Image (tube, helix red, strand yellow):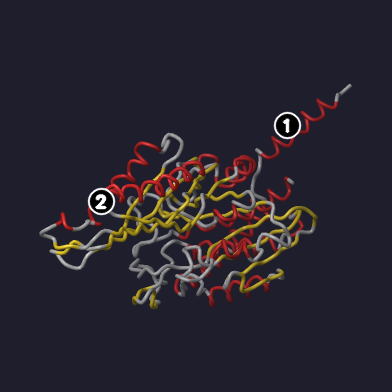
């Protein structure tokens, strides 16, 4: 006689083995390969016609038209220029979201490609070029391909797929709202309620055919801080008759680094405090009355993040007071920690391995770059990973956000396959 406990164990082992044997559906694989050239064509079009954050008007129109042509329920102008597409499967179930960011950067492209961007605009009162120097054009094209595949295979979908084309990942212009935070505020994860979300980022330093991932903190929380130091102006020949805000600034910078070197538990996760700009004074022989410092904090652990911000707020005014001045510090949160849900990663890792090959799915260290996909992950479980975009054999590939940035388009096909299968497998597991 088989007991209930034995039945439970058998069921668990069957489910476990099934999950760990995930392979790409032959029909999905075939269609992905059939539309690869179309995905590349879309990518090149977006690449030649880049638009900055909250200004992705034409990009959004192209996305919306494609989704409507596929028969999806489409909502436009979400968080200014975002587009949402909803695809209901033939079978009932939960809802999974797939996200792509669509904005470009104020970077003048010099990469030697036939579809090079020549677009120019004015950004913060400066004439600049505009280019997809971070690869968001590939993300958009990949997700359009996924939408086409899944729309033709609704019989494989147990639930609903929500396609999120997000503007302003690089941050909205000063004085504007935007990005993932505004999308959430406008209800993008509701109606229907999203149960999990997946996203990818092309990576110019990872070879085509490979995927990098990390459970837990995978990209950093990003804080921008501004420190205003007040001293007393005086002649440079008689510093004792005033209070030097530049010296105070130097002491503050030195003190902040001790938070990292002496207080933050770096064996848990990495953390960084950087002062990137100091503004003070007008003349070589005048000690100014004020100084301003602007910088960033990067953290991968919520407790460490709280510790560092608390200690900075305590330390800055205290150091300034010690040297006879005063100082204030203000923080602006740019992204939260891109935190991959451990259970979701464990559940979906076999899908990645089944498609890319186990040896090509690489457990990696975290990066101190930031990503506003993190805001989605604060609301629902999420899994964010990196897709290879470097030509094999190339060394020292140009990094993201640079004029030389280059992506090998052979990497897009794997992105289409993986995102399609993640949606199917996740919903079928529920």
Which residue carries the number 2 mark?
A: 250
- Please give left or right for residue 174 compared with residue 154 in the image: left
- Please give left or right for residue 126 compared with residue 192 in the image: left
Which residue carries the number 1 mark?
A: 13
Residue nearest the observer in this picture, 114 or 361: 361
Residue 11 seen by the camera: yes
Which element type, helix, strand or loop, lies under badge 2? helix
Q: Are marks 2 and 1 in contact (CB under 8 Å)?
A: no
Q: Nearer the viewer, mark 2 or mark 1?
A: 2
Residue 379 picture location, percent across and down: 63, 53
Give the quarter of the figure containing the N terminus. Answer: top right
> In which image quadrant can residue 406 be found?
bottom left
> In which image quadrant can residue 133 be found?
bottom left
- Please give left or right for residue 30 compared with residue 92 in the image: left
Gap in angstroms between the C-alphas marked 2 and 1: 61 Å
Label drawn at residue 424: none
Residue 397 picture location, percent across and down: 35, 54
């Amino acid at each position: 006689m088989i007991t209930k406990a034995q039945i439970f164990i058998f069921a668990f082992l069957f489910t476990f083995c099934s999950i760990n044997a995930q392979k790409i559906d032959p029909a999905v694989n075939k269609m992905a390969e059939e539309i690869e050239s179309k995905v590349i064509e879309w990518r090149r079009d977006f690449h030649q016609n880049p638009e900055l954050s909250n200004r992705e008007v034409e990009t959004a129109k192209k996305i919306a038209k494609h989704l409507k042509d596929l028969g999806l329920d489409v909502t436009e102008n979400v968080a200014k220029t975002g587009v949402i597409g909803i695809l209901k499967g033939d079978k009932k179930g939960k809802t999974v979201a797939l996200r792509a960011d669509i904005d470009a950067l104020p970077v003048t492209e010099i990469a030697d490609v036939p579809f090079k961007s020549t677009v120019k605009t004015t950004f913060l009162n400066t004439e600049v070029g505009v280019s997809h120097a971070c690869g968001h054009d590939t993300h958009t094209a990949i997700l359009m391909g996924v939408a086409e595949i899944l729309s033709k295979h609704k019989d494989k979908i147990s639930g609903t797929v929500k396609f999120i084309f997000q503007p302003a990942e690089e941050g909205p212009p000063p004085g504007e709202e935007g990005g993932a935070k505004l999308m959430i505020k406008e209800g993008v994860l509701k109606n229907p309620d999203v149960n999990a979300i997946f996203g990818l980022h092309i990576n110019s330093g990872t070879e085509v055919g490979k995927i990098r991932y990390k459970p837990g903190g995978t990209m950093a929380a990003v804080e921008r801080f501004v420190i205003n130091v007040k001293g007393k102006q005086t002649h440079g020949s008689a510093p004792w008759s005033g209070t030097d805000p530049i010296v105070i600034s130097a002491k503050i910078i030195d003190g902040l680094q001790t938070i990292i070197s002496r207080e933050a538990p770096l064996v848990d996760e990495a953390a960084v405090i950087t002062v990137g700009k100091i503004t003070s004074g007008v003349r070589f022989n005048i000690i100014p009355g004020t100084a301003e410092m602007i910088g960033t904090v990067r953290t991968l652990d919520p407790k460490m993040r709280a510790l560092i911000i608390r200690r900075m707020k305590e330390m800055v005014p205290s150091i300034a007071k010690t040297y006879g001045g005063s100082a204030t510090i203000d923080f602006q949160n740019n992204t939260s920690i891109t935190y991959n849900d451990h259970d979701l990663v464990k559940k979906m890792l076999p899908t990645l391995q089944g498609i890319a090959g186990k040896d090509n799915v690489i457990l990696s260290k975290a990066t101190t770059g930031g990503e506003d996909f993190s805001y989605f992950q604060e609301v629902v479980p999420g899994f964010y990973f990196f897709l290879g975009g470097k030509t094999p054999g190339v060394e020292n590939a140009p990094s993201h956000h640079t004029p030389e940035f280059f992506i090998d388009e052979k990497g897009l096909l794997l992105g289409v396959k993986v995102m399609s299968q993640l949606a199917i497998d996740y919903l079928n597991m529920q």
